[in-house]
């Protein structure tokens, strides 16, 4: 407790290992720290209005070790709070840990549950209100003891620049906090006589409509819900969209009653047991399905107006609410959910005469929002890990829909920080469990190349080039005497192609020689040429240009099939894929005659292994390079059909899919702007623009796209093979417009175009 003499705004700097909640006078004001790594452990700065009088500052801190989320790193449990230096030059001892008389006590009532699905996301919580020290957030209760200083915190020190945990200022804004709409109670039944609920399917003949209406009223905040003693109910709530959220339950009486809320992306057929993925069918359907999910539980102590929540958010569309009362009736006063995510909102706009494109935008945007928190994530439900291959696509969508690039820059730094001594980045970072996907290390270089083109900042790019050089050198160490890259140690994943084991292309395992992986290396060597040129390193750029040329010629010789006019996946020319053709074309190193045949073969060959949702981004990039729009629009049919299948976000892979929410499936949103509208940088830092629309069957298309210096606006209509309309560029930006009948120079401001 602290006595404040006068009204003031106090700036707190706060962090913890592993996590904290900070409360001021009993109210939650912050969660953290922003997730990072021991080499860059984040602290947050908060400006808190403090009125004159007595106040309580309370922190709930937890460290879960081996049962924590895989993405949660740790050095040693602890908590830090400091105050901005005063005008007199000293820290304010009334608040700061290590100076103020902080007290601590262990919180009772927390238990951790086990489930096969929580390996990556961390164990779920069961809070026993009968043992929880109520009022602790306001400093009440007994059992407090003096806090112990276990180590000094510092950001740097003249004689020890590499401490076990180096504090750095967090770079992201606070995560979003807002109420989740109440959703709809789809089903409620009495399960008092049911045994194992996990095997119990939903049948509408058991639906209790009256009680379902009462639960709906509770969710909407219109009334409380009373559960008689000795009852057991199960309800299915459809949130009608995907959410990442903290549940909050307020209850009265009902001692020994237990409430469990489990979350799922969709419901499963009764046969859906064992290893995922399995078929889920239409995501809107629940009749005859079983609920397989993760969540938290609370046991009531019988007192009035008890508030329960949890320590980490849950994710999904569907809730299974299980209520079991004992000898006393339970009154649920409130049941609400607080959405959490990075505060990303759509700044750009897009419309076309084919309304299916606009109708997909909420789904594409929602997928990215649900996978953007304190880092990017592959999926919010199953892993919550920041993978380089996924993040590259996330960054591209960011460049086209928001001016905010803080998350992009953080991601680029994180992968640089993750590198092994031999040079490779980790496939996902931060992560307690180390995994290497060598193709993702290469794609991190491509991710940096994209940043240089779309946002610039040569000093930032230059700061990461030591890392890109190390990744390339690690791959060069595995080039054989024939000039071909052999598979590096790790998981050489490229795409979830059904015919490929574990997503690895033919002959892509350790020590083997894969066509797609060799072309990927050429593609990234070209990216390195661009980055070194941008950074003012012509000697290194020349080196990578020589390597790219030599490697392209060796790869062409080994994998080119003259008869088929295609590149094989394997040295024996038994397997062929879209992936090999795409990467060969995107490398920019094919001879003109070969490039033309490969492009045609990509479009015509009937037996190529097809790109799935993730790698379709590179397929769309290839269509852009070929200036072929027909196949691009044909492939978009997959996304157009998602809503009819009940999806509210984009799935990880073709059915059967494990995850229903993978942000790498949001890449059509990038292509709406960068490929269909055709807006792309023509110079590093986007100081010049190239607009090469690919309208395909569209007659009209309009878009307003973010640019580092403002907005680019395009309004076009097609008349025969001619494009006409208006284009507006920001001040200081020039460019070129390309149409079927020629090109036109663009200047800053609004102008008419016709070509």
Image: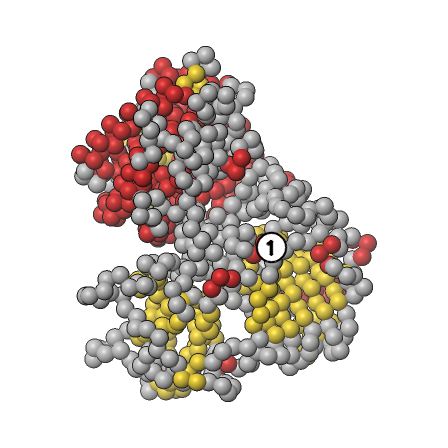
Is residue 240 shown above or below 485? below
**Residue placed at 17% from the left, 34% from the top?**
539
**Quadrant in the picture for residue 582:** top left
Count up the numbered dots.
1
Closer to the camera in the image, 735 or 596: 596
**Residue placed at 25% from the left, 45% from the top?**
466
- On the rendered image, what quadrant is the C terminus found in? top left
Is residue 266 shown above or below 31? above
Where residue 536 sits in the image (x, y, percent)? 18, 39
**Quadrant in the picture for residue 1:** bottom left
Residue 678 visible (yes or no): no
Residue 165 visible (yes or no): yes
Where residue 490 sits in the image (x, y, percent)? 43, 41
Q: Is residue 200 left or right of residue 72?
A: right
Specify few, some or many for label 1: CA neighbours under 10 Å numbering under 14, 14-19, or 20 or more. few
Is residue 347 shown above or below 177? above
Q: Is residue 390 left or right of residue 123?
A: left
Closer to the camera in the image, 144 or 225: 144
**Residue placed at 39% from the left, 71% from the top?**
78
Residue at the outermost top position: 563
**Quadrant in the picture for residue 470:** top left
Q: Which residue is mark 1?
A: 116
Closer to the camera in the image, 606 or 107: 107
Where residue 72 sits in the image (x, y, percent)? 44, 59
Where residue 400 sits in the image (x, y, percent)? 39, 42
**Residue placed at 46% from the left, 85% from the top?**
144
| Coloring scheme used | secondary structure
Judged from the image, the secondary structure of the residue bearing numbered disc 1 is: helix
């Amino acid at each position: 407790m602290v006595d404040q003499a006068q009204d003031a705004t106090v700036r707190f700097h706060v962090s913890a290992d592993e996590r904290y909640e900070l409360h001021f006078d009993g109210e939650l004001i912050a969660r953290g720290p922003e997730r990072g790594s021991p080499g860059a452990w984040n602290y947050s700065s908060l400006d808190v209005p403090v009125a004159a009088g007595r106040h309580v500052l309370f922190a709930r801190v937890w460290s879960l070790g081996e049962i924590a989320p895989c993405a949660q790193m740790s050095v040693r449990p602890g908590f830090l709070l400091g105050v901005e230096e005063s005008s007199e030059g000293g820290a304010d001892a009334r608040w700061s840990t290590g100076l103020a008389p902080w007290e601590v006590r262990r919180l009772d009532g927390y238990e951790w549950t086990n489930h096969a699905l929580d390996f990556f996301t961390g164990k779920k919580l069961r809070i026993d209100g009968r043992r929880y020290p109520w009022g602790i957030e306001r400093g009440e209760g007994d059992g407090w003891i003096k806090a112990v200083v276990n180590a000094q915190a510092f950001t740097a020190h003249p004689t020890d620049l590499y401490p076990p945990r180096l504090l750095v200022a967090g770079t992201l804004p606070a995560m979003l906090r807002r109420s989740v709409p109440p959703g709809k109670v789809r089903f409620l039944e009495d399960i008092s006589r049911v045994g194992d609920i996990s095997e119990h399917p939903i049948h509408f003949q058991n639906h209790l409509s009256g009680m379902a209406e009462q639960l709906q009223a509770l969710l909407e905040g219109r009334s409380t819900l009373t559960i008689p003693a000795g009852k057991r109910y199960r309800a299915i709530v459809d949130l009608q969209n995907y959410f990442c959220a903290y549940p909050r339950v307020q209850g009265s009486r009902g001692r020994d009653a237990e409430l469990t809320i489990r979350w799922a992306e969709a419901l499963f057929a009764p046969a859906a047991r064992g290893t995922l993925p399995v078929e889920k069918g239409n995501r809107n359907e629940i009749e005859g399905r079983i609920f397989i999910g993760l969540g938290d539980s609370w046991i009531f102590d019988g007192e009035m107006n008890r508030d329960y929540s949890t320590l980490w958010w849950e994710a999904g569309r569907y809730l299974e609410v299980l209520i079991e009362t004992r000898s006393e009736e339970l009154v649920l006063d409130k049941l609400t959910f607080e959405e959490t995510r990075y505060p990303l909102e759509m700044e750009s706009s897009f419309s076309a005469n084919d309304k299916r494109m606009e109708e997909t935008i909420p789904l594409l945007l929602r997928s990215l929002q649900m996978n953007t928190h304190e880092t990017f994530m592959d999926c919010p439900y199953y892993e919550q890990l920041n993978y380089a291959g996924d993040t590259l696509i996330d960054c591209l969508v960011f460049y086209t829909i928001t001016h905010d690039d803080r998350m992009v820059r953080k991601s680029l730094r994180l992968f640089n920080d993750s590198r092994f001594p031999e040079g490779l980045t980790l496939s996902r970072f931060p992560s307690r469990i180390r995994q290497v996907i060598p193709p993702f290390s290469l794609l991190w270089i491509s991710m940096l190349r994209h940043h240089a083109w779309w946002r610039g900042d040569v000093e930032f790019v230059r700061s990461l080039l030591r890392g890109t050089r190390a990744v390339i050198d690690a791959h060069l160490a595995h080039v054989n005497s024939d000039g071909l890259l052999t598979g590096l140690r790790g998981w050489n994943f490229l795409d979830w192609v059904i015919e490929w084991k574990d997503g690895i292309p033919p002959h892509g395992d350790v020590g083997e020689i894969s066509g797609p992986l060799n072309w990927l290396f050429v593609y990234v060597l070209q990216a390195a040429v661009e980055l070194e040129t941008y950074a003012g390193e012509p000697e290194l750029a020349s080196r990578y240009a020589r390597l790219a040329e030599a490697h392209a010629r060796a790869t062409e010789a080994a994998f080119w099939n003259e008869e088929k006019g295609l590149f094989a996946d394997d040295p024996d020319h038994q397997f062929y894929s879209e992936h090999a053709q795409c990467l060969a074309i995107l490398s920019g190193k094919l001879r003109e005659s070969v490039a033309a045949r490969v492009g045609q073969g990509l479009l015509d060959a009937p037996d190529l292994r097809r790109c799935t949702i993730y790698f379709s981004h590179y397929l769309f990039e290839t269509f852009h390079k070929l200036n072929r729009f027909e196949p691009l629009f044909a492939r978009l049919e997959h996304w157009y059909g998602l809503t009819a299948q009940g999806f509210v976000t984009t799935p990880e892979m073709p059915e059967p899919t494990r995850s229903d929410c993978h942000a790498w499936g949001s890449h059509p949103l990038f292509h709406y702007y960068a490929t269909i509208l055709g807006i792309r940088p023509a110079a590093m830092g986007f100081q010049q623009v190239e607009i090469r629309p690919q309208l395909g069957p569209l007659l009209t298309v309009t878009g307003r796209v973010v640019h580092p210096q403002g907005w680019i606006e395009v309004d076009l209509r097609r008349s025969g093979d001619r494009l006409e309309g208006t284009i507006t560029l920001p001040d200081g930006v020039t460019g070129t417009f390309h149409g079927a009948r020629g090109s036109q120079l663009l200047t800053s401001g609004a102008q008419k175009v016709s070509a």
